[in-house]
Image: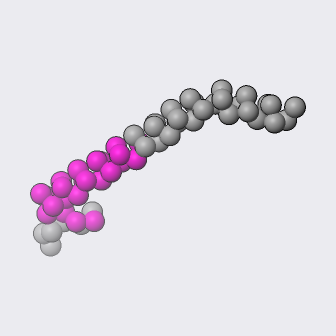
């Protein structure tokens, strides 16, 4: 009985797990783009690690 329940659960949840993995990967990619944009902006304005390049 337990094996049948685990099998049914794996079949029913497979699509949801795939969807969750896709969402997680999309979030990782978005975070990487955001970090790259922040690095680019920091270099363009002369700001590094929250500190101004000017004294």
User: Is residue 55 in the magenta section?
Assistant: no
Q: Residue furthest right?
A: 1
Residue in view at x 73 percent, y 28 percent: 8
* Percent coordinates x, y for residue 2 in the rendering: 85, 35
The quadrant of the picture occupied by the C terminus is bottom left
**Which residues lie in the magenta part?**
27-49
Q: Quadrant of residue 12?
A: top right
* Percent coordinates x, y for residue 9 in the rendering: 71, 31
Of residues 8 and 36, the one nearer the viewer is 8
The way the protein has been coloured in the rendering is one colour
* Percent coordinates x, y for residue 47 in the rendering: 19, 63
Residue in view at x 56 percent, y 29 percent: 15
Q: Work out whether 4 lies above or below 24.
A: above
Image position of 36 (left or right of 8) = left
User: Is residue 48 in the magenta section?
Assistant: yes
Of residues 30 and 20, the one nearer the viewer is 20
Image position of 52 (left or right of 50) = left
The secondary structure that most of the magenta stretch takes on is helix
The quadrant of the picture occupied by the N terminus is top right
Image label count: 0
Q: Quadrant of residue 3?
A: top right
Of residues 37 and 46, the one nearer the viewer is 37
Residue in view at x 33 percent, y 51 percent: 32
Q: Work out whether 17 lies above or below 50.
A: above
Of residues 38 and 26, the one nearer the viewer is 26
Residue in view at x 23 percent, y 58 percent: 39
* Percent coordinates x, y for residue 42 in the rendering: 19, 58
């Amino acid at each position: 009985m337990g094996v049948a329940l685990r099998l049914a659960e794996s079949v029913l949840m497979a699509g949801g797990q795939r969807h969750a993995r896709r969402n997680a990967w999309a979030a990782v990619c978005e975070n990487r783009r955001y970090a790259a944009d922040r690095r680019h902006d920091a270099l363009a304005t002369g700001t590094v690690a929250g500190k101004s390049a000017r004294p």
